[in-house]
Image (cartoon, rainbow, N blue to C red):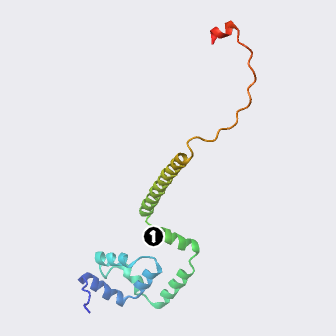
Amino acid sequence: MSEVKLHPDVKKFKAFVEKHPKIIREARSGKHDLNYYFKHYQKYGETDSLWDQFTENDNKETLETKKDNKKSWTEQLKGLVNKFEFDQIDQHLKQADSAISELKNLLEHFSEIRGHQKQTSQPPHPPQLQQPPQLPQPPMSRMNRRLF
């Protein structure tokens, strides 16, 4: 089986993360993803102060994990909302709206066709209803005849 060849920067970051497993735990907790840490690593290197939090003693880590576990649901929801890409959501909603309007137009079109077919399938002369009997009309005078 062939082994995947990684970029040298990725190899260095992978070795760095293996030395600092707290980075992986932090990424899994959802605070930041590994891509964020990798870009920070590329930009500032191993000597940046960001990495200090991942190398300190275990007592501080246990305190931090306890604090993270006690996060309220509002903070968790806030974290989820921060991960949303609202531009993409807006784009998807617009696509869904246009799809719904097209579906509505198709339904209207087919209902018109169906209505037209029902009209043409009816007998050409509908049954005639009986007309009410007519009362005899008084004879028209000469004057009335001229007007009409």
**Disc 1 target residue:** 83
Residue 62 place in picture, x, y as percent = 51, 88
146 left or right of 112 in image: right
The C terminus: image quadrant: top right
Looking at the picture, does residue 113 appear above or below residue 130? Answer: below
Task: Give the tally of numbered discs.
Answer: 1
Q: Secondary structure at mark 1?
A: helix
Looking at the picture, does residue 15 appear above or below residue 103? Answer: below
Looking at the picture, does residue 42 appear above or below residue 116? Answer: below
- Name the foreground residue: 133 vs 74: 133
Residue at the image point whose x is 54% and y is 84% from the top: 66
Residue 42 place in picture, x, y as percent = 29, 77
Residue 143 place in picture, x, y as percent = 67, 6
- Name the foreground residue: 76 vs 60: 76
The type of residue carrying mark 1 is Lys
The N terminus: image quadrant: bottom left
Q: For mark 1, does the 10 Å Cα neighbourhood hold few (<14), some (14 to 19), or many (20 or more) residues?
A: few
92 left or right of 130 in image: left
Residue 40 place in picture, x, y as percent = 33, 76
Residue at the far top in the pictured view? 143
- Name the foreground residue: 148 vs 101: 148
Say which quarter of the image contains residue 87: bottom left
Residue at the image point whose x is 28% and y is 82% from the top: 10
- Name the foreground residue: 29 vs 96: 96
Residue at the image point whose x is 27% and y is 86% from the top: 11
